[in-house]
Structures are given as C-alpha cells and as structure tokens.
Image (cartoon, grey):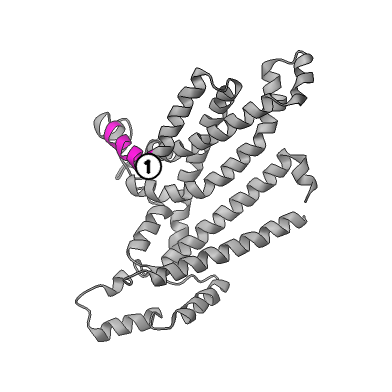
Amino acid sequence: MIRLVGRLAQGILVLWVVVTATFLLMQAAPGGPAILADPKLTAVERAAIESRLGLDQPVSVQYLRWHARLLTGDLGTSFLYQTPTLATVLGRLPNTLILVGAALLLGILVAVPVGLAVGHRPGGPLDRLVGLVNFTALAIPPFWFGIVAIMMLAARWRLFPAGGMMTPGAPADLSDRLRHLVLPAAVLALPVSAELIRYLRNAVAATLQASHLTPARARGLSPARLVGQHVLRNALLPLLTAIGLQVPLLVGGAAVTETVFAWPGMGRLGVEAALGRDYPLVMGITLVVATAVVVANLGLDLLAGWADPRIRSRR
C-alpha cells in the first residue's frame, strides 16, 4: 500500500514536470499563435485578440492562470477550433486508444511466440534471422514503413485503404473500420514487437539456464509444461517491464502514424496544434497523454506485483 501511494505521488510529480516543461518550451519557441499571423490584422485588432486570449499577460501570470483553471476542470479554449480544449481532446482520445491498443496487442501476439522460439535456441539460425529483422525494424523510421505500406498494399495491390478511419459515404460497419485499422496498427506495432521480442528472448534464454529448472527436467516434465509452469512465468516480469517502456513510445509514434495514415486521433491533432501554436490545445493533449501513460505504467506495476510475489511483499 505504501509503495502504491508512493507511485501515485511520483505520477503526480511527473505530470507537473511534463506540463511545466511543455508550457515553458511553447513560450520559448519563436513565433506565436497562427491566429495572430494574419497579415491583414491591424495592430489594434492584434492587441485585442491577445487581450482576449490572455497572451498580453506575463508568462508567470499565464502559467498560474492555467493551473487555476485546471483545478476547476477547465483547460481553456482552442485557438484553432474555438472549442473547449478538454472536449476537443477527449473527442479524439478514443481513436488514439483504438490505434495504440491494437498496435500493442498485435505486438504482444507476435512477440510472445517468436520470443519463446528464439529464446529456446539462442544463437541458432532462427535467432539470427529474427535479430536481423528486429534490427531493421528498429533502424528504419516508422513513417517510411507507413509510406511503403500505402504504396504497395493500398495503392498498388488495393488490399487495404490508404488512410482514414472509415470509407466516406459507406455504412460504418466493423469490417470497414478493421480494414482501415490494419495498416496503421501494423506499422505502429513493428518496432514494439521488435523490442518485446528482444526482451523476451533474453529472459527466456536466462531462465532456461537457471539451476531451479534442473529438478523439473529430472522429473521428466514435458517441454510444453516446462515453458508454461516455469519459463513463461519467470519471463513475464521482464515482458511487463518492456511493455511499460513501450507505452510512451507508442503514444509518441502514434503522432507520426496518425499523420501518415490520416487517422483522426490525438497524435494528428497534436501535430496540428503544435504547427498552429495552439497553446491551450497543446497543453491539454500533453496533460491527457501524460496522465494516460502514468496510469498505464501504474497498472503494469500492479501486474508485476501479481507476477512476482517478491515485489508484492515489499509494498
């Protein structure tokens, strides 16, 4: 319980550091909101807009006002869309959760069997082949895979849609949405599965060399039961740790993937907000994403305690 309270306190501190750093970086960035970039605006009109948006106040006052509104659940109004920031962000949040969740699930489904297979025979032909594929997946930027996937699988072979979340004008059924989800989820899952395979491969190889498996082998335990009762359980903790490390990378990669595939999620919204210097929207997206990452890591920490009783006993 004490450990859980400590993790919650750490999470709140992380959120404060993230939003503060984001606020200061936005203020230090050259240029200003796109709403003030119209050359037709007169000096009086520009001053009136700055006063209405609160941009004529010192940075310290803007910072304190944002925190004061945050305590009431008000994240301000988007400069670009002229809508409440929280409603705008939450409207895109489900789309990003669908994409990130599908990519994470796909990465785990690929990583577990492959990691177990190569971990059983480290240094073998399959291990070297998988290592080469993993190196390629981690070395090449995801947006390149996205462009290639659109060119080959969408434009040339027409197996999947090139972008968007559904076919315009067509009935919004589940099969259509799944077809639109395949390419962006696969591209986003590629580096994730590569990292998870690497972690799981090392964990399985180390577990198979452990001395506590000798009695199990002596009892004639079948390979399937050996993996299920001993190897997989011991490899679960490193896998959960690796998944926790991948969650922030997934969210960051979603911004690029959503832009390439025109997926209407928070990542694409964040790119538009950053380009338009939409301060309230950037702050709102940062807060929501950082909160989601902190909550996800807290949940994985609880799962790690279930997987390893030694962690649970220290709480």
**Picture coordinates of residue 39, whole percent (x, y):** 20, 75
- In the rendered image, residue 276, in percent from the top left (x then y), is placed at 32, 65
Residue at image position (48%, 45%) is 100
**Residue 69 image point, x, y percent:** 52, 75
Extreme residue in the front direction: 123
- At 45% across and 51% down in the image, what residue appears? 252
Q: Main secondary structure of the magenta part?
A: helix
Tell me: 234 left or right of 272: right
Q: Quadrant of residue 169?
A: top left
The residue identified by callout 1 is 141
Residue drawn at point x = 34 percent, y = 49 percent: 259
Relative to 130, 199 lies left or right: right
Instruction: Residue 103: say if magenta.
Output: no
Residue at the spot 71% in from the left edge and 38% down from the top edge: 307
Q: Nearer the viewer, residue 211 or 3?
A: 211
Q: Horizontally, is 207 left or right of 126 in the view?
A: right
Residue 159 or residue 119, whichever sits in front: 119
Q: Residue furthest left?
A: 40
Residue 168 visible? The answer is yes
Instruction: Specify the farthest residue to the bottom.
Output: 44
Magenta stretch, residue numbers: 140-152
